[in-house]
Image: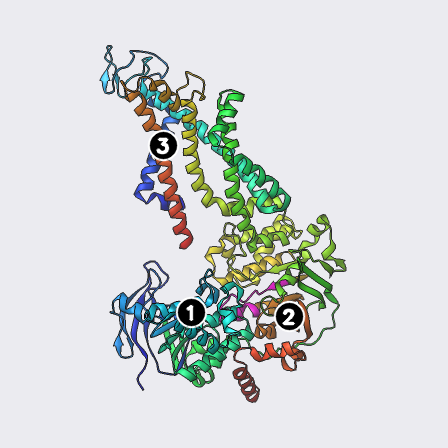
Amino acid sequence: MTAIVEITDLHIALPKGADRHWAVEAVSLAVAPAEILCVVGESGSGKSVLASAIMGALPRGLRRASGNIRFKGEEITRLPESRLRAMRGRDVAMIFQEPMASLNPAIRVGRQIEEVFEIHAPAMAGAERTSRALDLMREMRLPEPAAMARRFPHQLSGGQCQRVVIAMALAFTPALLIADEPTTALDVTTQARILDLIRNLRAEHGQGILFVTHDFGVVADIADRVAVMRHGRLVEIGAVEQVLNDPRHDYTRQLLAAVPSLTPRVRADTGAAPALRLEGVSKNFGTVRAVDDVTFEVPRGGTVAIVGESGSGKSTLAKAVIRLLEPSAGRVLVEDADFARLGRGELMRRRRLVQMIFQDPHGSLNPNRTVGDVLTRAGVLGGLAAGGARAQAAELIELVGLEPTALQRRPAAFSGGQRQRIGIARALAMRPAIVVADESVSALDVSVQKQVLELLDRLQSRGGLTMLFITHDLRVAAQIADRIAVMQRGRIVEFGRAVQILLSPEHPYTAELVAAAPGRAWQARRAMASTETL
Amino acid sequence: MTLFRALRRPTAAFGAVVVVIWVACALFAGLLAPYDPLISTTALVEPFSRGPDGKLFLLGTDMLGRDILSRLIFGARTVVLWAGLATATAYVVGIVGGLAAGFYRGAVDQILSFAANVILSFPVLVLYILIIVTLGSSGANIVLAVTFASAPAIFRIVRALAIEIREQDFVNAAITQGEGAIRIMLFDILPNATGPLVVDACLRVGYTAITIGILGFLGLGLPPPTPDWGTMVNEGRAMAMVFPYLVIFPCLAISSLMLGLSLLADGLREASREGSRA
């Protein structure tokens, strides 16, 4: 069988002054018809650049230095722009990470699908365009296609938008579909459905699919073959079973080891008194009840993970606990004082007891202040004298695994994972009773994510750190939490030991979340294999 | 850093040179000016020619026989001093108001924004004339008038920046640490807003220089005989048909300063954009 696309020895140069010479270096691979090839790698591995190179649409500043790309046997690297434009959308189509950003917010979605026909089949009659668009929407299993076609993108959910984008991509049943992290921005249950859809489409139309992802769970669920990339180079390529179960390259092994397992860690219940008690906490925005009557306890030295999809109210709850938002009702008891009702002066004095580790490692540190300045100030606000705060800053920076010289630098000098360590040090500098971590590892690559989770774990076993850990990822929750609270539409639908939630969920929504966790079957096999070898 | 990157662009470097020349004129007017700007010699000597006593007047003399070059050099002192001072005062007021409105939002923001919008709805020139005519013409009143008219625009820029930066997690982190509001505004918000403000300040000093010129032209500038570019244009206006150089040189002075500041501001804007991309 001849390959749909065949890349040989492709080199793509980065602009001068970048941290490496090649964005993509000496990459050769091919996608066969009806095959899903997953390109997997961490940020900066060149996987997205590779995908855009096939479309002949490299980002500004990058250029192909050498190598060939053959599409159905035809060399396309030297084709004029007009030929490439005709191919895009007809023979090769692409779907992106952000479905909302891929659609024009001012045009009804049905019309946007029809436009694809207008571009590539100008002779087609208007009525036929409309009916073809509706057919596509039906095929994407969008409910009530006729009504849906008249809506604007903002009136659709993220998953529905991605279905519209896929409909546009498949309008001419292209031979090759390039999907660049198409499910990364979606909730897990939505992700599971979109992956299902992509698999079915492949079975019906026999497209070759190049699927770019950072998530080995997704790879396990969808790939036929896997290509692992690092620093622009292809380190390993092979059948999915071989790469996942018997990786040849050390880097692949490292990556696989870093993938958080769905198997919860088992920890003895300390029976410690609660450090944080929530009693009937609610938060209304106008008539919308974002957090609805939430009650639970976090024992001293323990970790409770709040798991939920976007819009479930988990971040609002975190902000209400830490008083970045005023709770509408209920009590937040920290050291037996109701944190939710403290007056201004008393709140300022007790702020240090509840600290937060934020999600975005880039936005959570002031770019103009040195790390030492940030940590020392936090110590002073936590009640230390200036000298003591400086000494503590030096201790903390070592504790989170950074060099003492880090104190003199500004945030721009650090990677995402390092910044997250600084964020952790800043929270600890206040000597808090409880730390709220809001999606604190979600923006990190898996290997970095693993290190940060291990750091948190180490801090916890060392000094009785109490944590409320907000995450959308059940796998992360499994790794960090003793107890898990599952949130849906503002309510806690299930609360219990991590083992119980993950292995025998009682609420149907919890069961759905567990079932949708990517790579679940593969992980179960892996867990089994590892217990056998023990 | 941004300044150095900006100066690598030829246009921005040219702008900077022009600005530096005028600032030097203002600082060292006494050393640079060939004559005393207030002493009359021979009236209406043409540029590049000598008076009857053999003195060379590069840019000629005005109808009272004062050396135009010397008056321009001393006039730079008026413009640079008062335009700089007035812009700085307007910035202090605009920044304080903008930070407060952007940080606290709510009632503080509504009241300040309403006041700013009311002032901005008046034509600027009418405001200036009203203030100067009411209070009399003096340096302090020019500062007051410019502050009153410019601060609302600066307020709006600072407010928009503050609202955006306020949403960043490092500000949330400071709040949850129990950091005081004033420290958050001064250490977390303001330093991260300086880029756009520096660019705006460059342009605004230029506008203020023009404004001072216009006030001088309208006879509302600094009281005579202080040399002032706008006043010089006004005085030369009557004879401009016969002796155009009386008007041309002060006009060139005003526009060269404005051009220099604009080119520098453009360069800074481009350079800070590059900086944020890198």
Give me the residue at 54% from left, 44% from top.
B159
For badge 1, the amino acid type reads: Ile
Q: Nearer the viewer, residue A241 or B132?
A: B132
Q: Closer to the camera: disc 1 or disc 2?
A: 1
- First to last magenta residue range: A435-454
Residue position for label 2: A488
Q: Secondary structure beneath disc 2?
A: strand
Q: Could you say where residue A89 lies in the image, as x and y percent from the top left?
A: 36, 71
For badge 3, the amino acid type reads: Leu
Quarter of the rendering containing residue A131: bottom left
Distance from the alpha carbon under mark 1 to that under mark 2: 33 Å
Q: Nearer the viewer, residue B87 or A159?
A: A159
Q: Is residue A445 left or right of residue A281?
A: left
Q: Nearer the viewer, residue B109 or A229?
A: B109
Q: Is residue B130 left or right of residue B273?
A: right
Give me the residue at 63% from left, 65% from top.
A313
| Same subunit: marks 3 and 2 | no
Which disc is residue A113 wearing? 1
- Can residue A41 be seen by looking at this rendering? no
Residue position for label 3: B257
Q: Earlier in the sequence, mark 1 or mark 2?
A: 1
| A277 to B129, vertically: above or below | below
Q: Could you say where residue A392 lies in the image, as x and y percent from the top left?
A: 60, 55
